[in-house]
Amino acid sequence: MDTTKVTLILDGEQHEFEMDKNDVVLDIALSEGIDAPYSCQGGICLTCMGKIKSGKAKMIDNQLLSDEEIEDGCILTCQAVPESSTLIIDYDDV
């Protein structure tokens, strides 16, 4: 199984977990008991937006973020699937 070690920074705290690269970051964070921000889970409200600090991820669907925001590291975690062995996303830096 191809997995990613994910670190989420939320309210100044780091939360770490491992996940399959085919799964969505927000879904696994919530299943791990992390109180990550979200609302619609459909990629249309921006509530779950974070900033990639290290690693790579792609969005299944993106209807809101501009190319510039994506280049700056912004990602909607409800649409994010990892593409690297480690991934750090900061919710506090958006």
Image: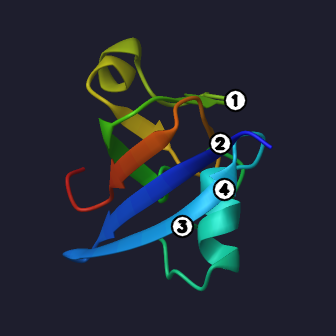
Q: Is residue 21 left or right of residue 33?
A: right
Q: Earlier in the sequence, mark 3 or mark 2?
A: 3
Of marks 2 and 4, the one in the foreground: 4
Q: CB atoms at circles 4 and 3 under 8 Å apart?
A: yes
Residue on which the image places disc 1: 61
**Residue that mark 2 sits on:** 79
At mark 1, the secondary structure is: loop
**Residue 90 makes an appearance in the image:** yes
Where disc 3 sits, the SS reads: strand
Residue 19 numbered mark, or none? 4
Query: Earlier along the polypeptide chain: callout 1 or callout 3?
Result: 3
Please tell me how crowded label 3 is: few (under 14), some (14-19), or many (20+) other residues with Cα within 10 Å.
few
Q: Amino acid at mark 2?
A: Gln
Determine whether, in the image, residue 63 is placed left or right of residue 48: right
Mark 1 closeness class: few <14, some 14–19, many ≥20 residues within 10 Å: few
Identify the residue under disc 3: 17
Cα distance between the residues tagged 4 and 3: 7 Å
Which quadrant of the rendered structure holds the N terminus?
A: top right
Q: Residue at x 38, y 23 (%)?
A: 70
Image quarter of residue 52: top left
Residue 69: x and y in percent read: 32, 25
Mark 2 or 1, nearer chain start: 1
Spatial CA span between label 3 and label 2: 18 Å
What amino acid is labelled 1 in the image?
Answer: Asp
Q: Does 40 sit above or below residue 54?
A: below
Q: Secondary structure at mark 2?
A: loop
**Labelled pair 3, 2 in contact (Cβ < 8 Å):** no
Say above or below: 2 vs 30. Answer: above
Residue occupying image coordinates x 44% and y 68%? 16
- Amino acid under label 3? Phe
